[in-house]
Image (cartoon, rainbow, N blue to C red):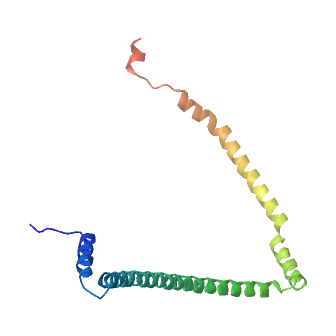
Amino acid sequence: MKLKIPKKTTNNILRLLLRSVPIIPAPELYDIFKDLNESKKTINEKIEKAYLSLKETSDLIEDLQKDLTNRTEKVKTIRDEYERYSKLAEIEEEKIRPLLIELDKTVNKGRGLERWVSFGINIIAGILIFSLGIWLGPKISAKFSEAPKTENSTTK
């Protein structure tokens, strides 16, 4: 079984042994080396944090650049559409009015005649259905009013 000595205890034992060295301030030198070693670790940690931060910043800037590129393309598309529609809007109403008048005449030509023809067709169809109803009505009523003969009705 291996005995594990805590680091603090090891440091204290080492300092005690270094005090026995004459003339040289060994414990103080040990503390200085220890502090330098710890500061080296903290500097390395700070460098690592700075590296990670720079990497995240670089990724964020790349994402922003892609987003800005996409938005710039969309703005260009919208600007092109705007220019196209503004050119269409430049056509003045006075230039288009004769065309609208001719178009209205063409569409409305014969509208009254079409209405009278439709009215006549509807009247004829209505009279025909009415006449068929008068002629076939009694025959259909007689068909439905006849009761089917069953054996029970004859025996009573």
Considering every residue shown, the one lying at the far left of the view is 1
State whether residue 147 is above or below residue 114.
above
- 151 or 24: nearer the eye? 24
Residue at 87% x, 78% y is 101
Q: Quadrant location of the N terminus?
A: bottom left
State whether residue 145 is above or below residue 43.
above
- Residue 60 at what x, y percent from top left? 52, 81
Residue at 39% x, 17% y is 152
Say which quarter of the image contains residue 82. Answer: bottom right
- Residue 10 at what x, y percent from top left? 23, 73
- Residue 71 at what x, y percent from top left? 61, 82
Residue 4 relative to residue 142: left or right: left
Q: Quadrant location of the C terminus?
A: top left
Residue at 87% x, 85% y is 92
Considering every residue shown, the one lying at the far right of the view is 94
Residue at 43% x, 23% y is 149
- 125 or 58: nearer the eye? 58
Say which quarter of the image contains residue 143. Answer: top right
- Residue 49 at what x, y percent from top left? 44, 80
Residue 35 relative to residue 96: left or right: left
- 36 or 134: nearer the eye? 36
**Count of marks placed on residues:** 0
